[in-house]
Image: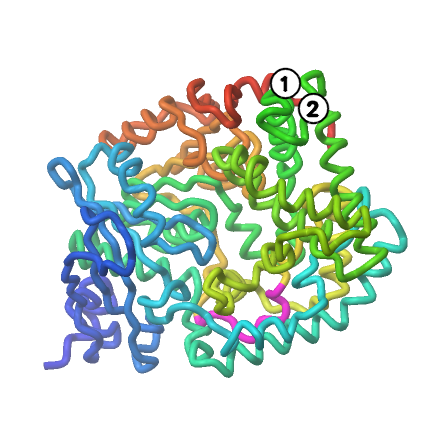
Amino acid sequence: MKFPKLVCAVAPSLCTYLGIAVDGSAALQRPHIRWGPCSPSLGVNPSLSCGTFEIPLDYHNHSAGTGHLSLIKANATGERRGTVFMNPGGPGVSGIEGLNFTSALLLNQTGGVYDIVSWDTRGVGSLTIPGDVNCFASAGEQAALFSETIEVNGIEQSGNFTDPFDIQTLLAQASQMQQKYEELGKRCLEQPAGRYLRYVGTAATARDIAALADALDGPGSLINYIGLSYGTIIGSWLVNMFPERVGHVIIDGVVDASMFSKEDISLGWSQQLVDADKAYTAFFTGCTLAGPDACPFASSSTASPLDVHTNILALLQSAYDASRANSAVPVTSGQLRALLRPAMYSPSAWQDLVSNTLPPLIQAVHDEAQDDTKRSNIPARRFLDRRQQASGAPVPYNTEAIICSDTRDTDTNMTRVFDGIISTSQNISHMFGSAWPFATYYCPFWPVRAVERYEGPFNKTLANPILVIGNTYDPATPFAGAKATADALGDSATLVRLNAFRHTSQAEPSACLSNIVRAYMVNGTLPSGDDTVCEVDADFEVFTGVNTPAILANMPSGNF
């Protein structure tokens, strides 16, 4: 019997739960999740469970067909109250891997009273459909397209990108790189993943979360969610698309979703770098405090932070000079910047960066300066090539597919993108403004847009207030994004700042912040006002014997 259209008009969520389309016709049946042991090939903690969840490719057009999400779950350790969904960011980061690494932390911060569920979103992994966005049949095919371009070598610049030679050299490559990115888009469409590209996007992921909540906690249930980095865009879209269903929601390392929806992302993303050089300042300050035994950039025990900064600039300049003299050198300054930029995200890895990752590259640069590149015993170009996996397979374009599917259509060309990079390097981030490649720069040339895109508003009144967390100096999602998001939501959000210098609060432990998160998730209580500041635990060492408070206290002022 056909379900009455009137009922579906006034209670669409009920129709969805019953497997009825809102026009009263038959639709997809409400999916069932069967949990079981995770495949040994995933290499995850055996205490975690795995499952799959069927989804419509297009929630507004079921004739498009179906896909499925690959799920992972950490069971509540106490009396279960429901489910918390978690997205680790990226976009393109595996939720399966993310929960495997953070399940103990999340269970502790949520009081053990929720199952924690994550998943490989659309466009991620080999188990979800739509999954990895593979655009090349082989790594060789991929390498051939981008050989001897800035995609491999990075952008060469000295100083703050004011040298006319550097500017003209970059702008002269605009036509070539635009053609390369347009060709990439064609290759992506030609591969099997191409048919799914229009179904990969943030709005679809927000609807997937609502459908998962229906399946796990009941139709129309409140949705609990923790999103990091790009996961905060999902969170902002989710709470504004489903304001009546907001339960306990935390967004951490926040991108201002209103900026993301209104601006050309290939040009506007530069605002995400406003604190990147502050994080870099924390890095060279920590290196100084650690001394030469722990950090090779600290040339002596009496070196000042500015001395260490000068030593890093000298390394970049040496690589730059060698590359201008011989474009075939193994390590370029552009590659080093592209390596250092994401390294700023995680202070816990800084010691390994300076002790293990950088020394062979520093040696390679030294050999370049001596015109003795044959002495370098590392395949540095391969080491620094972001477009080849350890297995030798081509790297998929998951991040680009997700973030570019959500961007606005514009008439931006590569010359405008390059002009923006030059301006960003001169005015916003001297150190990382020219780091290339980066996902947003593909977007003007990406071949498709998502079938659904949420454009706001982002100030809806929510069923329950959410918790918004930002770091003092975040190299990828500045505190200004967290503040703008919380301000827009008014009484529906509470803002907390962690006095730290990395990307998202999970990178540096804070008992203060963990207590706030736990009180919110368990009791629904939040600090009053938006001026709460938490400190990083004093026993957490960034470098050996050096903690976050010591670095903050010794950071020199000014822009570097």
Q: Which residue is mark 2?
A: 305
Q: Which mark is residue 389?
A: none
In which quadrant is the C terminus drawn? top right
Of residues 315 and 534, the one drawn nearer to the viewer in this rendering? 315
Please, what is the three-letter code of the amino acid marked with disc 1? Asn
The answer to whether residue 133 is visible is yes
Q: Position of residue 319 (x, y in %)?
A: 76, 48
Q: Position of residue 510 (x, y in %)?
A: 40, 25
Where residue 462 sits, quadrant-wise, is top left
Q: Which residue is mark 1?
A: 554
Image point (60%, 24%), residue name: 293
Query: Relative to 114, is 522 above or below?
Result: above
Say which element carries label 2: helix
In which quadrant is the N terminus drawn? bottom left
Question: What is the magenta range?
Answer: 442-451
The answer to whether the residue labelled 2 contacts the one labelled 1, judged by CB atoms less than 8 Å apart, is yes
Of residues 418 and 486, the one drawn nearer to the viewer in this rendering? 418
Q: Look at discs 2 and 1 and give the one toward the viewer.
A: 2
Query: Relative to 327, is 67 above or below?
Result: below
Label 2 crowd (10 A; few <14 / some 14-19 / many >=20)? many
Please, what is the three-letter code of the amino acid marked with disc 2? Pro
